[in-house]
Image (cartoon, rainbow, N blue to C red):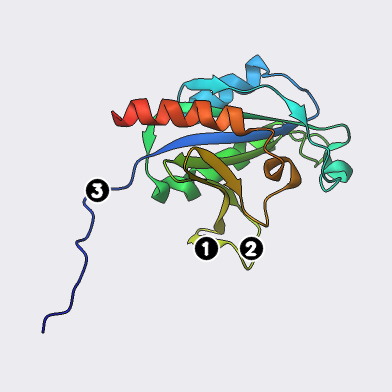
């Protein structure tokens, strides 16, 4: 009796680069957008900034109040590029640092048809190591028309306030994939 071995998929699974920006300035600043586009390609979606009020985790470094806005970039990439994207995001954060403290937190990640994954330099029992000091943190799953947060997602992702933005980004992803 032969063992049943599933076929190996060909090519990298397509995904869309996304960004969750944490900032004390609730707007898409032109200079920051220019840097983001130079690093990651043209922005094709910029969501509204909403209060980041579920935790004070970043307040000591970045001040308060803070806001989060989510964006996506035109074109498809592969999840294997996430460590490179995270290091580029760190370079941009460093450019916006004042007195050794970040003024912008760039959570770069990807959206594929099934999930939202953000890159992290922080390890954790629920994160998967990708190499180069970067872990993948699945934040939201997608099935049957609904985004569902993971248990470890920040409160603002758990309460669904960005779901409209991610649905819009997912539609852009599907269009780019030809679906």
Query: Residue 84: where, in percent of width, then height?
Result: 47, 46
Residue sitting at x 83%, y 38%: 53
Label 1 close to label 3 by CB (< 8 Å): no
The label on residue 165 is none
Left or right? Give the position of 31 relative to 84.
right
Query: Residue 56: where, in percent of width, then height?
Result: 86, 45
Quarter of the N terminus within the rendering? bottom left
Query: Residue 105: where, in percent of width, then height?
Result: 70, 38
The local crowd at label 3, few if under 14, some if 14 to 19, many if 20 or more residues have their Cα within 10 Å, is few
- Dot 3 falls on a residue whose secondary structure is loop
Is 10 above or below relative to 160?
A: below
Label 1 close to label 2 by CB (< 8 Å): yes
Quarter of the C terminus within the rendering? top left
Residue 85 appearing in the image: yes
The label on residue 11 is 3
Write down the residue under mark 1: 129
Left or right? Give the position of 28 relative to 143.
right
Q: Nearer the viewer, residue 57 or 53?
A: 53
Q: Nearer the viewer, residue 160 or 106?
A: 160
- Dot 1 falls on a residue whose secondary structure is strand
Write down the residue under mark 2: 123
């Amino acid at each position: 009796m032969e063992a049943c071995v599933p076929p190996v998929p060909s090519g990298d699974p397509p995904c869309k680069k996304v960004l969750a920006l944490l900032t004390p300035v609730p707007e898409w600043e032109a200079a920051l957008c220019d840097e983001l586009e130079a690093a990651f390609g043209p922005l094709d979606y910029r969501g509204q900034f909403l209060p980041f009020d579920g935790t004070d985790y970043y307040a000591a470094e970045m001040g308060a109040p803070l806001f989060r806005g989510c964006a996506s970039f035109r074109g498809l990439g592969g999840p294997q590029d996430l460590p490179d994207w995270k290091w580029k995001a760190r370079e941009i954060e460093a450019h916006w640092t004042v007195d050794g403290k970040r003024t912008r937190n760039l959570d770069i990640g990807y959206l594929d048809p099934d999930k939202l994954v953000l890159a992290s330099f922080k390890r954790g029992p629920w994160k998967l190591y990708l190499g180069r000091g970067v872990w993948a943190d699945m934040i939201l799953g997608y099935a049957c028309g609904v985004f569902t947060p993971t248990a470890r997602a920040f409160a603002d992702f758990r309460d669904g306030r960005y779901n409209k933005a991610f649905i819009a980004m997912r539609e852009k992803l599907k269009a780019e994939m030809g679906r």
